[in-house]
Every structure is written in structure tokens, then in C-alpha cells.
Amino acid sequence: MATQTQSQFYTSLKKYYTFYTGGFITFVVVLGILEWMGTPNRALGYMFLIATIGLYAGIGIMSRTADVAEYYVAGRRVPALFNGMATGADWMSAASFIGMAGTLYATGYDGLAFIMGWTGGYCLVALFLAPYLRKFGQFTIPDFLGARFGGHIPRLIGVFAAVLCSFTYVVAQIMGVGIITARFTGLEFQVGVFVGLAGILVCSFLGGMRAVTWTQVAQYIILIIAYMIPPVWLAVKQTGVPVPQLVYGYQLQKVTALEHKINADPKENEVRAIFKKKADDAKAALADPAKAYAEGRAAAEKKVADMQAANAPAEDLKKASDEVAGYPADVAAATDKWKSDAKLAARAAPLKPHAAIFVGSGKDDAEKEADSNKQRRNFMALVFCLMVGTAALPHILMRYYTTPSVKQARVSVFWSLFFIFLLYFTAPALAVLVKFEVYNNLVGSSFANLPNWVNLWQQVDPALLSLADINADGIIQRAEIAIGGDIVVLATPEIAGLPYVISGLVAAGGLAAALSTADGLLLTIANALSHDVYYKIIDPNAPTSRRLGVAKTLLIVVALIAAYVAGQKPADILFLVSAAFSFAAASFFPSLVLGIFWKRANRTGAVLGMLVGLGVTFYYMATTQPWMRGMFGVTSPIADNMWWGINPISAGVFGIPAGFIVVIIASLLTRAPGAEVQELVDHVRYPNLEGDIDTRAV
Amino acid sequence: MKLTAKHEEYWQRNLKVTAILLGLWFLVTYVLAFFAKELAAITFLGFPLPFYMGAQGALVVYVVIIWYYARYMNKLDIEYGVQEGEE
């Protein structure tokens, strides 16, 4: 390939990936025929798993390299279109693919903060960072901090922030791989984690960025096909139009009408009242568990005794004695039960309409108004943090080092967002279509006659879907359905009545999303350590072979640590992933942007700005987020520590401005940077200058 | 390397287009979200307008912003003679 010109290379890439897409579709069709001929579902699941991971491994092996620039930035010849696809796969994680539509299902309008935040951030990438970083042309984001601000300290803070953000994120991806593999092949979760790990490693180990890039393009194609088919089918089923994004506004109107009907239904109120009573009882019991435990036990036993004395019917007597037998063995067990019962309060609340915008709750109008304003503030703060965080995550920014030119880098951001947009504007449609299906077809039908997909998913995982006839009327009320977010994407093929092969395809898509993001993140962490710490600081004279050896060793070590942590199933991982956005935004964004747009920014400013940005964000989370408070032993009431009622997930909204202000003030108070820094800034601002310096790394 | 007045002008024009596009980005994201409740009565394709903007409209504007910026700057490079050589 080395002898090809860039345009020949582009032409042959287009040819390869067209064949590849055709081949993949043929593969799915063949599996569909096998299913029709009676191949069991589990075997189809294995075939998808083996075929796709084998494919990624094959691309990884074909892209192996011993060249430093190939390993770190794919030889800087990835055309804009393909870099866009690779960025799309790099960006869209297991959470985007599987969780996003579920979040939208659960939260309606509020969830759109994620849709806007995770797409609008690319405007900042395009306008402030991508073209300039490409002109700079080195290997990592800490590289830029090191060159622009001078000295090892800015670089090291950059390494620390990059590892902090990327590691939590990669753990979540590996967990996603484990869950998907376990569900569709029946392997243990821990085994699934290591299968996924192998898939990640064969790809990135041999070929670094080059292998990751070409695998990510392949993964994007799989994940977008897999995401699109079920909503299109569902839209045809519900409306007769195969463009869900265009027609779901009218489905949303129907959902809104159904919500009114459900909220007014006396049977629904009955179910909610039962939940409320249970939750209230549990809360009362939790006030003094020991006393409540003794009283509850005595009451249950007394009931049996009374019934025996009154010669009650055998059926009632059996029910009462079952209650005694099932009574928790000790106070601790009872406390656990009450704690979970107390959470039923959420199910006692009336439906929040999907299209409702910032509806405040409170005793009077003033309270409602204040609550509504607080929701609006939080919505906007979250959008802001997600956007700036997007534009500061090193594994995304790094992708723009791989294009052949500044010009292509600019176009490549367009393709990136375009490919991401395809999935993100489908997710809200999917959420509404599934909600219509549940409210219109499931609610009001009888427990004796449940649809197929409901029976199936209740068995697979009760956390995803469980129905219980709370008020014993034989009819399904909305409040009797407990639904987990992930099911929205995972069960759509069955809801739409598609064959199992499409379910397998969706799983393969989720796997592709998780693996591609994990690839990019692992490479970011390993490169920050091998390139920035080892090569730039510890041993600048290291020969190429040793640099790559260190990079590959670190990649395996980091991957194993991440898999080990994922195997422990850390509970607060989702919070940590969201927190990564605030951390990335507050640490990198001010220094990177001011480094390009303000020549006067200097080392002191950047160092203090990054530290203060991180510090403020961290402080706010540590004092307001329950899990972090527990870790740092913060006991003062949360309400006292909140600033303007902003949720801890959006802590970056304070950290980002703090970072900007500190960079500016500290720079102005200290000496202006020297002439070579001025020259560097001019260098990155102009795609081509006569007599220009060359900063490209080799 | 000495920058000419023409180079300076290129950078100023870049800053100007960046500022305008950023203003548009701010408008469709934050101004619309701020007035979401007031705009909810307007219906578009069956959606309340702010819902549509959050789910689709703003996204389309973001894609167009980036497309326009790339086109504008790639032309500006040539106009000011700072474009790159053959790739």
C-alpha cells in the first residue's frame, strides 16, 4: 500500500468496505436462512460472536506495524470519510447503543440533554480544536500541552487527566462487552469479559492506531445497520412509513393522549396506592427497625393464631402461615427488604408525560416555578458539560491527528458528526415507538394472554422487564410494569416481530459499539503512558523497537487491569462515566483552546488552570454525590453544599469557567511566553506558511 | 517566519466566522432550551417545537455548522494562499 497515492488509497478503501458491507449483509441473510431451517438461537448467537470478533482480529493482524507513526497515528493517511466513521464508532459506546434509547424512554424531554450534548460538542471540536491539532501533528493530547506550554509538568497533568477520564470509561465498555456476550451466548459474565478483552487486544496490540482505525470503520458499519433495522420495522408496523425519524412526532401525540388516559384510570390509581402504602410502611419501619421487626413478627403470628381460633377457611389460613414462614429471618434481612420496598415510592408516582418540559412539583405555584427553573438550569448545565467534555476527551481528539491534512481534518469532523447523527436522531424515535407499543398494546391486556416478547424477556432478566398483578384484577396496569432501560433496544426486534437473527445482529452491533470505544480508550491510556511518560520524559533516546515494545506491553497491562476491575462489577460505574465528561472538560478544554487562540497563555497559567479546573469539579462532586461523599467521609447535608441546585453530574459547569479564569489571570500575572511559542501558535493557526517550522512527530 | 498583513486578515476572518457559527450553536442549544416552556405550544411535525429541536432540529444545525465551517475555511485557505500542497 505504501506505493499508492492518497487518491488511489481512498478508491481502494471505498472498494474494500463496499465489498465488506455486502459480505456482512450476505452473512446475516445466510444466518436468517439457517434460522428458518431450524438452527437453535444459541448457535446463531455463537456464530455472530465468533464471526465478528474473528473479523476484527483479522483486520488487526492485517494492519500489524512496526512503524511509530503508523502505530500512533495510522500513518496520517486516513481519508476524512473513513476517519468520520472510525470516530463515530470510537465515540458511540455501549451506553449510546444500548442505554441511550432506554434513558430517553425513562426521562422524555430531559433525556434529550444527552442527545444535544453528545452531538453539539462536535461543533466545538470543529471550530476550536481539530484543524489546529492536526497541523500540530504529534501523537497525543499531552504532546500539545507539553510543546505549547513547555516543561514536563503540563504534559504530566495532561497524562493524569487523560488516564483518569479514559480508565473509568473503558471499564464501563468492558462491562458492556461482558453483559452482551453473557446474554447472547450463555457464557458467564466474567468469561464474557475476557472474550471481549481478547477481541480488543488482537486488534490494537499488533497494529496500534492503524489497526484500531480500520477495525472501527468495520465496526461502525455493523453497528449502524444493527441499530437502524428494528426502528424502521417498528415504524412500518405502527404507521406504515419506513422512516421512524419523520413520523414519530405523531406517535408522540398518541403517547401523550394515552398518558392522560392512564393517569386518569382508577385502576392505575389503585395500583399506585398499593405501592405507596408499601413504601410508606417500609419507611416507617426503617425509623426503628428492631421494634418494627418484633412487632411485625408478632402481628403475623397473632393473625395465624386468631384464624386457627376462629376456624378460618384453610385457604386463608395457609396464606397467613406462609406469611409467617416467609418473614425475614433477622433484623438485617428485614431492613434490606424495607429499603427495597421504600424505593417503590417511585412506582407510586403518576406518569411523567414524555413530551412534558420542565414540569415543576411543589406545594404552591412559587415552589413549582422554582422547581421548574431548577430543572431548566440542570438541563442546560448538563448539555454544557457534555458538549465541552466531548470536545476534550483525548480518545476523540486523537483521531484528528490521523487525517492526511488540515483540510481533511475539517471535513472529517463533519463526517464524524454526520455518522453519529444517524444513530442519535434515531434513538429518540425508538424510545417513542416502544413507549407507544407498551402503552397501547401491553397496558390493558390480560395477564393470561401476555405477548410473546414479554414472556421471553421476563425469563431472560427480571431486572429488564417484570410484570406482577399487584391489584389482582387480571389486567395489566401501566404501574404494574417494571421496565429497565436497556430493553428498549434489546427487545425491539421481538416487539416488532422480527426473526431471532435480527436480535443477534443487534447484539453484534452493541458488541461492536463497546469494543470500538474500548479500543480507542485503551490506546489513549497506553499511549499517554508509553509515549508521554516513557519516551518523552524517562528515555528520550529509546530506539523505535523499544518504544513500540513498551507501548504494547502497557496496552496489555492496562487492558488486564481494566478487565479485572470490570469483573468486579463496580456499581457506580455509570456515575463515573458521566463524571469523566466533567473532568475532561474542566482539565483540558481551557488550556487547549487558550493555547491555540491566545498567544499570551503561558505555562503557569495552564498548569494552575488545569489543576483548579479539576479541583473545583472534584470538590463539588465530593461534597454532593452520595457515593463520593461516602468515600471522602463528607457528612454535611447535601443541600448545604449545592450551588444553585446543580446536580453533581454537571460539576464541570463550575470547573470549566474556573479553569478559563485561572489560566487567564495566572498568565497575565507571570511572564509572557517566548518567541518560539509565538511561532508555534502561528504554525498551528495556518495550514501552510512559507518558511514554517515542522512539529510533526516521527 | 514573519506574518504579513494578509496573514493577519486571514486569522481575523477565521475568528469572525468562528464567532458567528458559535453564536448560532448557542442560539439553537441554550436560548431555545431556556425558552422551552414558552415555545412548547408551537407544534412541528406533531412535536412540541422544543422537543423537536432537542431531538432533531439542533442536531441538523450542528451538522450544517460543521459542514459550512469546513467549506468556508478550505476556500479561505486558497484565497489567502495558505493551503496545503498535494496530499
Image (tube, coloured by chain):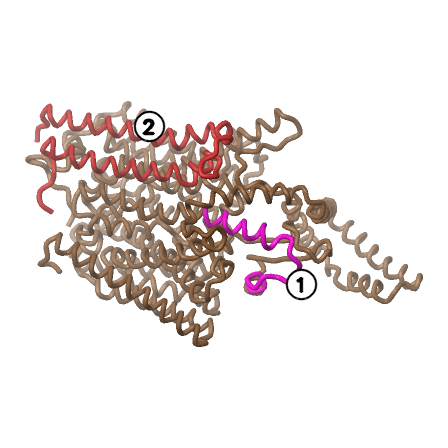
Chain colours: A brown, B red
Question: What is the quadrant of residue B52 in the picture?
Answer: top left
Horizontal side of residue A329 vs A82, given as left or right: right
Disc marking residue A448: 1
Closer to the camera, A608 or A122? A122
Q: Chain of mark 1?
A: A
Does residue B85 lie above or below A604 as drawn? below
User: Does the stretch in magenta take in A451?
Assistant: yes
- In percent of width and height, residue A267 lies at 71, 48
User: Does the stretch in magenta take in A15?
Assistant: no
| Residue kind at label 2, given as amino acid type | Gly
Q: Residue at x 17, y 59 (%)?
A: A12
Cα separation, mark 2 vs mark 1, equals 57 Å
For mark 1, give the secondary structure: helix
- Is label 2 or label 1 in front? 1
- Which residue position holds label 2? B23
Q: Chain of mark 2?
A: B
Give the magenta range.
A429-456
Disc marking residue A427: none
State the quadrant of the N terminus of chain A: bottom left
- In percent of width and height, residue A390 lies at 35, 42
Badge 2 local density, few (<14 within 10 Å), some, or many (20+)?
few
Q: Is residue A146 visible?
A: no
| Residue kind at label 1, given as amino acid type | Ala
Does residue A425 lie above or below A31 as drawn? above
Question: What is the quadrant of residue B12 in the picture?
Answer: top left
- In percent of width and height, residue A457 lies at 55, 62
